Image: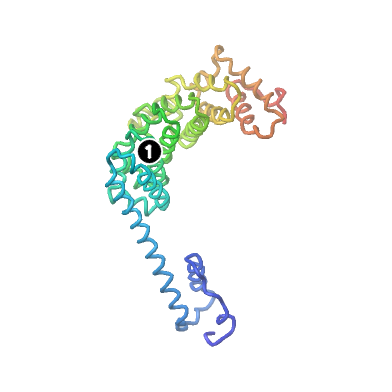
Amino acid sequence: MADGGPERNRQHPNNLQGLLRLAVEAGSVGDTAPELHPMPEERRQWLQDALSDAFNGQLDELKQIKDCLQILHETCEDDANEEGRRWNALDTVADLCENLDNAGDFCKLSGMQMVVENFLECPDPGLRWRTAHLIGTCSQNNPFVQEHVLNLGTMPKLLELLNSDDNDMVRIKALFAVSCLVREQEAGLLEFVDHDGFSVLMRAMQSGIEKLKVKAAFLLQNLLISNPEHKGADSLLDTVPHRPVIPNVLCSMGMVQQLVSLIQTEHDSFHEHVLGALCSLVTDFPRGVKQCQEPELGLEDILIERSRMLKDQEEFQEELEFCEQLLRICFSQPEENGMDR
């Protein structure tokens, strides 16, 4: 085979994806053992170069992170002339840390500790939101980084920014970081609950910042969907004392009433997530259903009217489904209530 035929004319891959394909092809074994041949010099050289490039590329990214940290170390003091350099350094690190290995290396280099301590609560809003964005980027789907960030005492700082910062972008990015620390992360969720995070989330949903409202409602909906084990009985407080029982917390703080008040405002795209959160809260949870049935809320009439309004609007079909689901769960209303699609 080495003397000619299709093997001679086959082009060698020119990237790591091609290298992987070549390795898979080489490792495929049929009914008989493969015939072994010496690796041609051309292929040997290509393989060596590809692996060298990949290794050097990783080293180059690590060097970029170190260079950015050096800039941030040198310009920690409030210096308007260095503002652009610090912004660029944080932006660059955030881009590089979309790679999970780079995010871990950034933490091991004490970079996360440095930016949290120096920039998360600094006077410059450009540094605050970029730091919050970096925290979220590094923490997303990365348990090692999530634990590291939580151990730095970052959650209460992020919640404070989300709750009261005077810059809209800072609040939006703080919510992004919080989301990356609580979703599929029990320790982060517990700390979120302990610091009254749901109240902060509700106030974000009541803000006048459209993007913040949508993201806050979406996070609430997803937290309730991804944590169904916390929905049922009050006895769970006794059997698992260290785990947050979310719906009990939410019902006690009047979350049902506040969610209903949000959908009474002028129709908005974020209502879909509000209704979705309400559905998740009451599903298999009688206490939530009972609160929805309180006559003073007028929720049944709201849902019927909203369903009629959305019936023929294709872009609001998910919201319509949530309305119908709530009517069935809370008021035993079948879909024939003038809401047939």
Percent across and percent down for residue 193 are 37, 29
| Location of the C terminus (image quadrant) | top right
Horizontal side of 18 relative to 307 (left or right) equals left
Percent across and percent down for residue 147 are 33, 43
Q: In the image, what residue occupies the spot 70% across and 28% down?
A: 311
Secondary structure under the numbered disc 1 in the rendered image: helix
| Location of the N terminus (image quadrant) | bottom right
Taking 54 as reference, is 262 above or below it? above
Q: In the current view of this chain or complex, which residue is farthest to the top?
A: 296
The foreground one among 78 and 321 is 78
The foreground one among 27 and 86 is 86
Horizontal side of 285 relative to 272 (left or right) equals left
Percent across and percent down for residue 44 are 44, 78
Taking 327 as reference, is 295 above or below it? above
Q: In the image, what residue occupies the spot 60% across and 29% down?
A: 322
Q: Amino acid at mark 1?
A: Glu
Horizontal side of 16 relative to 7 (left or right) equals left
Q: Give the colour scheme shown.
A: rainbow
**Residue underneath mark 1:** 186
Q: In the image, what residue occupies the spot 68% across and 24% down?
A: 309
Q: In the image, what residue occupies the spot 62% across and 33% down?
A: 318
**Crowd rating for badge 1 (residues with CA inside 10 Å; few <14, some 14–19, many 20+):** some
